[in-house]
Amino acid sequence: MKKLIEGLQEFRKTYVPAHRELLAQLSQAQKPRVMFITCSDSRIDPNLVTQTEIGELFIVRNAGNIIPPYGATNGGEGATIEYAIHALGIEQIIVCGHTHCGAMKGLLHLNKLQEDMPLVYDWLKHAEGTRRLVKDSYTNHSDEEMLEVAVAENVLTQIENLKTYPLVHSRLYQGKLHIYGWVYQIETGEVLAYDPITHTYVHPQSQIVDDDADEPTGKPFVKTSAPPVACEYAPAKVLHSDMAEQSDNEASQEPVPTPWLTPESVRSDLSRIQQEQLSV
Ligand code: ZN
């Protein structure tokens, strides 16, 4: 506690005088551009990691960066999402998981949790889709690999949960909302972003789209050892120059109004459905 109180004094002494204008501006209203949903884990600091200032991120945190599906609970997550989109006009949401996530470890060993932490056990029911997918599809992996997969897949499960909210559904349809899946690597401080075209986690620089430019900017895709994942989500503006060049379809270079109906996502959906049929 002593450390925290000293921190308060230091904040007032150095940060506040240097940011008086910003703080005065923020006292009138907030205008964050991005909603950031992440785990409560103390090793993640959204503002530090993204080098953003006070007022730039609207943050939701809980164990396991979980969004209960619409109507499943009457908790704070749904209300916060509604407020972010409707009242603040936020158009970008990031769901950010992280390596070594305790909640995901718990999810993989649910039977141990029920007695010791019944509330966590109940909460993790909103990640049951992740548990089931990992259990059914990733059998011959070490515990460490299973955890990595669970973290990566859970980000996508929670994006799917997010899409069950009527407001999110509607804004996605209008092309006024973009959702991104990130995984923060505690060891290296690196963030990998889900790419719906390649179904892998890639360096997020490759997904930067300059609103004023015709072509996406940033570095090329870098394949990682992150597991392949199955997800139907495909944001309209996440197009990559390499992918666009490889594509025979000229139309795929244009933003499309209904994000999930890109040719890539339809193709991937088809191949996923075919694979599912084969495996039945
Ligand atoms: Zn965590």
Image (cartoon, helix red, strand yellow):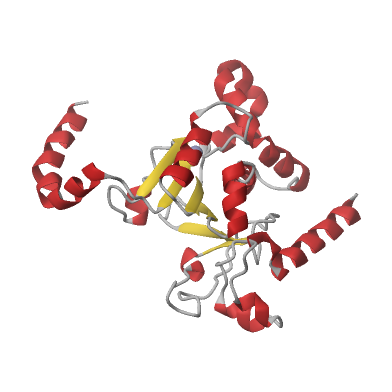
Q: Is residue 147 visible?
A: no
Question: How many numbered circles does the render carry?
Answer: 0
Q: Is residue 128 left or right of residue 90?
A: right
Q: Is residue 182 above or below residue 150?
A: below
> How far across and how far down the image is residue 136, in percent?
78, 43
The residue depicted at 53 percent of the width and 35 percent of the height is 78
Residue depicted at x 56% and y 38%: 67
Would residue 255 be found to the left or right of residue 86 on screen? Answer: right
Could you say where residue 88 lies in the image, as x and y percent from the top left?
40, 46
Relative side of 129 to 279, left or right:
left
Residue ID at (51%, 58%): 192
Tell me where residue 129 sits by quadrant.
top right
Give residue 271's quadrant in the image: bottom right
Quadrant in which the N terminus is drawn: top left
275 to 95, vertically: above or below: below
Of residues 155 and 86, the one nearer the viewer is: 86
Q: Is residue 124 visible?
A: yes
In this view of the protein, which residue sits in the foreground, 106 or 207? Answer: 207
Residue at the spot 9% in from the left edge and 47% down from the top edge: 17
Q: Residue furthest top?
A: 115
Q: What is the x, y in percent for residue 221?
A: 55, 72
User: x, y percentage for residue 15?
Assistant: 15, 47
